[in-house]
Amino acid sequence: MKLLSTLFLLFLTMTAFAQIKVNHIAVHVSELERSMEFYQKVLALKEIEEPFKDGLHAWYDIGGGAALHLIEAPNWPKEISKTNHLCFSIPDMAAFVQNMKARNYPFESWAGVKGEITNRVDGIKQIYIQDPDGYWIEINDDF
């Protein structure tokens, strides 16, 4: 009987979370306007309704019903690891890289080689860039 109860609770838990989805990702930024310019101009994200209206927040549509939420606040993290990163998928890596080069915007491979594209073992191409606060962003063609 205990096994059946445990299995039933496990089933209820799994069912409750079967509908989970990403709502938004929050990123702590030091200067909102500078970060907004980056996410709008470099990544071409579309700004969406900002509910707080306090000049410290910005929201962007990142697809699939999810949003990127920028929050300006003091004491943003100083040590930022490439392992902790946002990732955006695009349909045309060559066009994106060309845009980065036209803007003189630095990018690198996972290994840190400047101006190089990583070709993952699964065939996905990826590069890494940093936003104005140094957060790492992976751009890949797994669109």
Image (cartoon, rainbow, N blue to C red):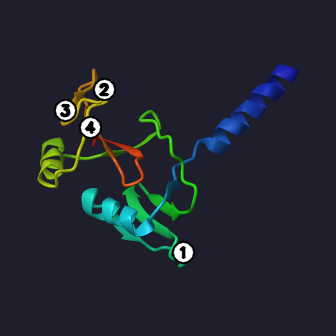
Q: Residue furthest right?
A: 1
Q: Residue drawn 16% across and 51% down? A: 104
Residue 41 picture location, percent across and down: 26, 63
Q: CA distance from mark 1 to mark 2?
A: 39 Å
- Disc 1 target residue: 51
**1 vs 2, front mark:** 2
Q: Is residue 125 left or right of residue 78?
A: left
- Disc 3 target residue: 116
Q: Which mark is residue 127?
A: 4
Residue 44 picture location, percent across and down: 27, 61
Q: Secondary structure at mark 1?
A: loop
Badge 2 amino acid: Ala
Q: Is residue 126 left or right of residue 33?
A: left
Is mark 3 in CB contact (under 8 Å) with mark 2? Answer: yes
Q: CA distance from mark 2 to mark 4?
A: 10 Å
Q: Which mark is residue 70?
A: none
The disc, 1 or 2, on the residue closer to the chain's N-terminal end is 1
Q: Residue drawn 58% across and 55% down? A: 75
Badge 4 amino acid: Ile
Residue 21 picture location, percent across and down: 53, 49
- Disc 2 target residue: 111
Q: CA distance from mark 1 to mark 4?
A: 32 Å
Residue 63 picture location, percent across and down: 38, 56
The disc, 1 or 3, on the residue closer to the chain's N-terminal end is 1
